Image (cartoon, helix red, strand yellow):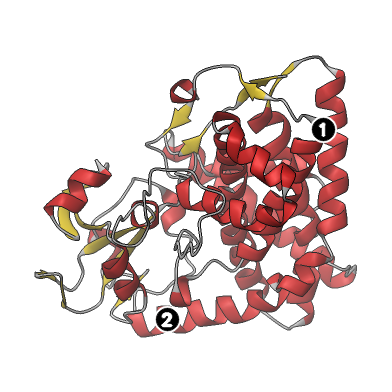
Amino acid sequence: MIRDARAIGPVVKVRTLAGDEAWLVTRYAELKQLLVDDRLGASHKDPAHRARYLDNPLFDMGILSDDPAVAAEIHGRMRSALTPHFSAKRMMALRPRIAETTNRLLDGIIAKGSSAELHGELSLPVSFLVLCDLLGLPDPDKFMMMLSTAGDVVDSEKAEGGRLVLFDHLLELVGYKHANPGDDLISALCAAGIDDDFITKLIAITSFSYLVTPKNLSAGIALFAEHPDQRALVVKDPSLLPGAVEEVVRMSKTSESCQPRYAHADIDIAGVTIKAGELVLCDHYAAGFDDRVFDAPERFDVTRSPNPHIAFSYGSWYCIGAPLARMEMQEVYAALFTRLPDYRLAVPIDRIPMINDLQLGGGIAAVPVEW
């Protein structure tokens, strides 16, 4: 489908899963151009009648205004508040904890036998434990259940109720951090004098966005199993690991690969006019397979250089959590290759369970392996 869309044109009209029309952008150059165009944003002046990507309440957490100028200001405040706490230096302090957590989980996995499902037994728990450490959340299991309920895209009433419970829980936690500050992100945001309601929404959005990381982790586990020659290269030369992670991210299809945005004014691009108010789907995953930029893009190549993918988005939309995601993936793969050097997929890669039509659940669902 990606090739078909690019063959038609860089920017093509499609119909979303919610039944509305949108412009799909799949080519690298055009997508980069739009991502730095201030006429494109996350808000819509008439939210009740905007075109929808999915019927998902998580697209409107009440943090962005329907006024594009106000929404841009709020988006800037969000990034300014969060960016210092996701710096590469700050993330490095988490590296020992990630390594310890990964090896502890692998101890349990190896002790149980010669097979495992590494998405549920490794990728998800590592990611949630790291997230809860970063935020200062005391109960990872409870928080994961809350996110899952709030992200239900099948039962909208359940999702709405779950979202209210989640926000109430986070608001209560913010109050606790005011009185009992720790060395964590929520405490730092409280100390910065940011409004409690705003902190709550920031943490919710950060948490949902972070759900991409375990999917990327699992995609890499599967890719390295399917391409043992590439895994062998990394094992032989660990300096290749950072580049290998970039290649995994480029090739990983996740729920957030296609970001919905709205035109705030008419935009002429690639021979078409995107009208003000129209929905634009920015497909970062498809852009990573643009053969105008990437040689043999279907090939998994840990030595690919340069690798200018925009899977973490671009410009003011660039993912704040990218340094943490990269470090987490490096630590998990390094430990996995050391502890289970001969692991292999228990099913053909085309039978790896995937969920492709849900915003939060989209992406890889399980990675059954043997060793």
- Residue type at mark 1 is Arg
Question: In front: 167, or 204?
Answer: 204
What residue sits right under mark 1 in the picture? 339
Q: Are marks 2 and 1 in contact (CB under 8 Å)?
A: no
> Residue 204 location in percent, x, y?
60, 58
* 198, above or below 285, in the image: below
| Disc 2 secondary structure class | helix
Asked if residue 269 lies left or right of residue 337, the reply is left
Q: CA distance from mark 2 to mark 1?
A: 46 Å
* 202, above or below 243, in the image: below
Which image quarter holds the C terminus?
top right
Q: Judge whether residue 143 can be spotted in this image.
A: no
Residue at 80% in and 25% down? 109
> Residue 219 location in percent, x, y?
55, 39
> Residue 32 location in percent, x, y?
34, 71
* 180, above or below 155, in the image: below
Residue 72 is marked as 2
Q: Judge whether residue 317 can be spotted in this image.
A: yes
- Residue type at mark 2 is Ala
Residue at 60% in and 49% down? 213
| Disc 1 secondary structure class | helix
Question: In front: 44, or 225?
Answer: 225
